[in-house]
Image (tube, helix red, strand yellow):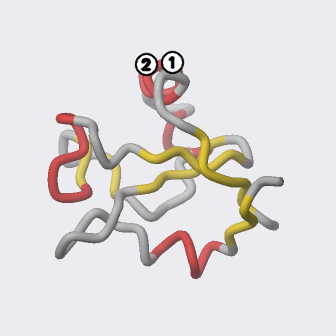
Amino acid sequence: SMRVFTKEELSRYNGKEGAPAYVAYNGKVYDVTGSFHWKGGKHHVLHDAGQDLTESIGRAPHTAELLEKFPVVGVLRG
């Protein structure tokens, strides 16, 4: 069964100070910790880890395809 994250829980996975970097998109939570593009919890200054990117990715369509390559670690509630 998938782990369920609240937005508050997700925000702790911001890639800073050794924390894993997770992002949510369309209700799924992806682990982007290993990605060169998410060094320090930031993606090209546009996006922050620990956030729900569903709306912001609408403005950056390439990101959705990139996320499909990462492991899904849970689902976002709400």
Name the secondary structure under disc 1.
helix
Residue 71 in the image, given as x and y percentages of width and height = 53, 36
| Count of numbered tags | 2
Q: Looking at the rendering, in which quadrant would you find the N terminus?
A: bottom right
Question: Where 50 sits versus 6, above or below?
Answer: above
| Residue 65 badge | 1
Residue at left offset 57%, top offset 78% = 9
Residue 20 in the image, given as x and y percentages of width and height = 34, 62
Could you tell me if the residues under marks 1 and 2 are in contact, i.e. CB atoms within 8 Å? yes
Residue 19 occupies quadrant: bottom left
Q: Looking at the rendering, in which quadrant would you find the C terminus?
A: bottom right
Residue 28 occupies quadrant: top right
Q: Is residue 68 left or right of residue 47?
A: right
Q: Identify which residue, 34 or 8, lies in the foreground.
A: 34
| Dot 2 crowding, Cα within 10 Å, few <14, some 14–19, many 20+ | few
Name the secondary structure under disc 2.
helix
Q: Is residue 8 left or right of residue 31?
A: right
> Tag 2: residue type?
His
Residue 74 in the image, given as x and y percentages of width and height = 68, 54
Q: Identify which residue, 60 or 26, lies in the foreground.
A: 26
| Residue 29 badge | none
Question: Where 33 sits versus 9, above or below?
Answer: above
Residue at left offset 49%, top offset 52% = 23
> Tag 1: residue type?
Glu
- The residue indicated by pointer 2 is 62
Question: Where 62 sits versus 45, above or below?
Answer: above
Q: Is residue 78 left or right of residue 43?
A: right
Question: Where 25 sits versus 3, above or below?
Answer: above
